[in-house]
Each structure stands twice: as structure tokens, then as C-alpha cells.
Amino acid sequence: QKEVEQDPGPLSVPEGAIVSLNCTYSNSAFQYFMWYRQYSRKGPELLMYTYSSGNKEDGRFTAQVDKSSKYISLFIRDSQPSDSATYLCAMIRSPVNDYKLSFGAGTTVTVRA
Amino acid sequence: EAQVTQNPRYLITVTGKKLTVTCSQNMNHEYMSWYRQDPGLGLRQIYYSMNVEVTDKGDVPEGYKVSRKEKRNFPLILESPSPNQTSLYFCASRKQGEVTGELFFGEGSRLTVL
């Protein structure tokens, strides 16, 4: 069993729809949770970062962490064609003491104009 | 501009022909790492380095070597490439102790081994 599970999709939605992405994980020691966005032929870039359980909002993006269920989510409201990318979840025990991010496989999202 | 630079971006080679993928960062980051990305498997760590002359294996180190003689450079060496090393490779760096743990990635090197 993988340490981080993420449905690879692909996911295709019309412009303006809400996109819902999620990951599950098995290691309860993870404390820091991230979402990276990767455009085609580019390297991943950090989109959002959350510590422990709770919600975090940044514009049209909302990240949620439920540590009791070992489940994290990313929501994209009013999706735009420019949101078409692969979204990877990532997590780590401690950025200060730990050296390894554990990544999900990534979900490919296409927003149709 | 802060960046991680990888070269070559695209490479086709044959089994057994040694090759090196270079990686350089201009952000003075202590930590550097190599990943490979394969469909359905996501990003898997090959090797990482906490600082100059300090390296360690990641999840899939077999068939790869690295060195860290300078802080800014972290080359990935394939001594005898095989077809199962055909993949998209990413170099990444981050500032040690940064609370977000944000990794900065290069644009990737697509390697095909025939």
C-alpha cells in the first residue's frame, strides 16, 4: 500500500465548476500538508500549504485537512481554463527535521472553456 | 531570478552509455534532491543531499549516483542506463529549516533509454 493515495483522474469539468481533489494517507506522523500544481512540461510549484488539521483559503482555492480521517482535500471554486494542470498532494512530518516529502501520484484536471 | 536549472531538458540515449544530468540552483539552498516522475506512480525520490558532501538514498536509488561537491550543483549520474530508467526527472531544492518545506523544482529532464 502506498503511503499517500491520490486518484490520478483525469478530471474534466466545465469552466466555472467546483473542482474537488483529495488524498488519503497512512502515516499519522504527517503534520504538514501541501498541494503542488504542475503545468504541462513544467516542474511542480507550491500552491498551498497547511499545518495540521483545519481549513485554509487563498482566493479561489481552499485546502482542508482532516487528520482524524487521514484525508486532505483541495477545492477550486469558479474554475478557469488556466487551472488545467496536474495537482499533487504532498506531506511531511517536519520540514525542519525531516528530509522527505511524500507525494501522491497527482490528479490531472482539465477545465473546458 | 531564483531558479533551479537542469540540463539537458530532453535526451535520447542507448543502453549502457553513461550520462549525467546537471542541476544548479541560485538560491543558496542547503537541501537538494532528485525525483523521477512516472505515470501512475507520481514523484519518487532518487537521492537527496542535506549539504555539501552529504548525500543519502531516497526510495529508488538503484542505478543512479550523485555527488555534491558545491552547494549550488547536484548532478545525477546514470553509469549504465537501462530502458527502465526512461522517465521524467526533476531536480529540486529548498532552504533547510524553512517552515513550509517548500520545494523549488527545475523544469524537468525527459530521458529515453533505448
Image (cartoon, coloured by chain):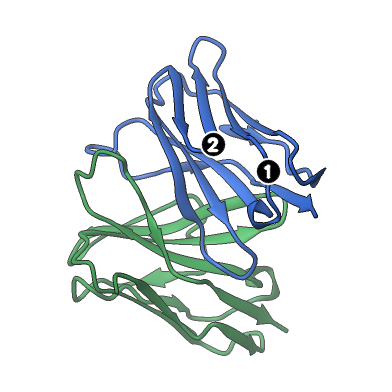
**Mark 2: which secondary structure?**
strand
Specify few, some or many for label 2: CA neighbours under 10 Å numbering under 14, 14-19, or 20 or more. Answer: some
Q: Quadrant of the C terminus of chain B?
A: bottom right
Residue B32, above or below A12: below
Residue B95: horizontal and vertical position, in percent?
A: 23, 54
Along the line of sight, the residue nearer the viewer: A18 or A110: A18
Residue A4 quadrant: top right
Q: Earlier in the sequence, mark 1 or mark 2?
A: 2
Residue at point 66%, 36% (across, down): A6
Along the line of sight, the residue nearer the viewer: A56 or A22: A56
Residue ID for mark 1: A79
Residue ID for mark 2: A61
Residue B21: horizontal and vertical position, in percent?
A: 45, 81
Q: Which chain's residue wears label 2? A: A
Can residue A8 be seen here?
yes
Residue extending farthest top: A68
Going by the image, does A65 lie left or right of B50? Answer: right
Residue at point 20%, 76% (across, down): B69
Residue A38: horizontal and vertical position, in percent?
A: 57, 57
- The tint chain B carries is green
Residue at point 19%, 70% (across, down): B71
**In the rendered structure, which amino acid carries the disc numbered 1?**
Ser
